[in-house]
Image (tube, rainbow, N blue to C red):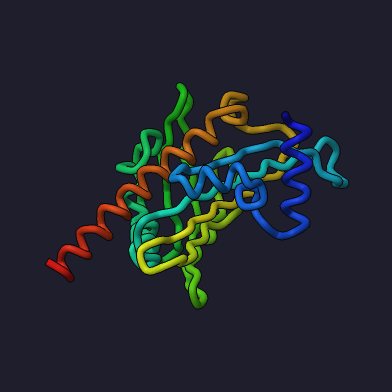
């Protein structure tokens, strides 16, 4: 299974496409309404002995306009309502830092996450980098691409290099994937509800 995933990810990266779009069965699940999140550990060629890389990829379709999805994604202080694991969230616009208190599977920590939002033609993007906490150095982005007026494709990317994984092994094997998927599901539900509310207001 791990060898299969490694080969697919190598192929996907060579084409600059996420795995969930390269693998037909995964993309079919996305088109059928699932949120797909993949987390894997890979060895890297590096001057640092035993260095590894955590790779995060995910995607899903949202029945809402890109503008609504982009707006909901930037409500950083509402993150605790979208996640069972985020206990508090404070955003400082001056530094673009979100301070999070997180607790999951009996483990608690805090972190500062830098975010930057911008839009390019038919695509919106949130870049992020974890600045403090056990996962400091994790970088990635969330992209939102408009497929049609009321349908948006959302993609998640993340990368984290380390020699020893800083969280309990459960997070590497299961926890991160589960947490990202649950967060994505709830954000999608909220965006779709807001889109329908806006439509009722515009077309009563």
**Viewer can see residue 137:** no
Q: Residue furthest left?
A: 204
Would residue 200 appear left or right of 41 to someone viewing this image?
A: left
**Viewer can see residue 122:** yes
Front-most of residues 80 and 151: 151
Front-most of residues 70 and 198: 198
Q: How many marks?
A: 0
Which residue lies at the image location 41% right of the left edge and 66% below the top edge? 94
In the rendered image, residue 188, in percent from the top left (x then y), is placed at: 37, 49
Up-down relation of residue 62 to residue 122 (above or below): above
> To which quarter of the image does residue 200 belong?
bottom left
Which residue lies at the image location 47% right of the left edge and 39% below the top edge? 181
Q: Residue furthest top?
A: 106
Would residue 48 appear left or right of 176 to someone viewing this image?
A: right
**Quadrant of the image for the N terminus?**
top right
Q: Residue furthest bottom?
A: 121
**Quadrant of the image for the C terminus?**
bottom left
In the rendered image, residue 13, in percent from the top left (x then y), is placed at: 74, 54
Front-most of residues 81 and 151: 151
Up-down relation of residue 195 to residue 122 (above or below): above
Would residue 144 appear left or right of 201 to someone viewing this image?
A: right
Which residue lies at the image location 46% right of the left edge and 23% below the top edge? 105
Which residue lies at the image location 74% right of the left edge and 44% below the top edge? 8
In the rendered image, residue 91, in percent from the top left (x then y), is placed at: 37, 56
In the rendered image, residue 96, in percent from the top left (x then y), is placed at: 45, 62
Up-down relation of residue 193 to residue 200 (above or below): above
């Amino acid at each position: 299974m791990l060898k299969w995933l490694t080969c697919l990810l190598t192929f996907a990266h060579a084409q600059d496409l996420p795995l969930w779009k390269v693998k037909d069965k995964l993309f079919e699940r996305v088109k059928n309404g699932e949120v797909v999140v993949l987390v894997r550990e890979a060895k890297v060629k590096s001057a640092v002995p035993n260095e590894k890389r955590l790779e995060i990829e995910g995607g899903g379709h949202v029945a809402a306009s890109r503008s609504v999805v982009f707006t909901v994604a930037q409500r950083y202080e509402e993150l605790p309502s979208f996640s069972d694991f985020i206990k508090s969230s404070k955003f400082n616009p001056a530094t673009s830092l979100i301070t999070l208190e997180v607790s999951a599977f009996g483990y608690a920590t805090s972190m500062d996450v830098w975010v930057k939002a911008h839009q390019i033609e038919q695509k919106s993007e949130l870049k992020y980098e974890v600045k403090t906490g056990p996962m400091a150095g994790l970088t990635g982005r969330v992209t939102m691409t408009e497929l049609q007026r009321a349908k948006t494709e959302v993609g998640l990317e993340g990368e984290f290099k380390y020699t020893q994984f800083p969280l309990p092994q459960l997070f590497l094997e299961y926890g991160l994937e589960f947490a990202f998927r649950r967060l994505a599901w709830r954000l999608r539900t909220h965006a779709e509800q807001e889109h329908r509310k806006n439509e009722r207001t515009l077309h009563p």
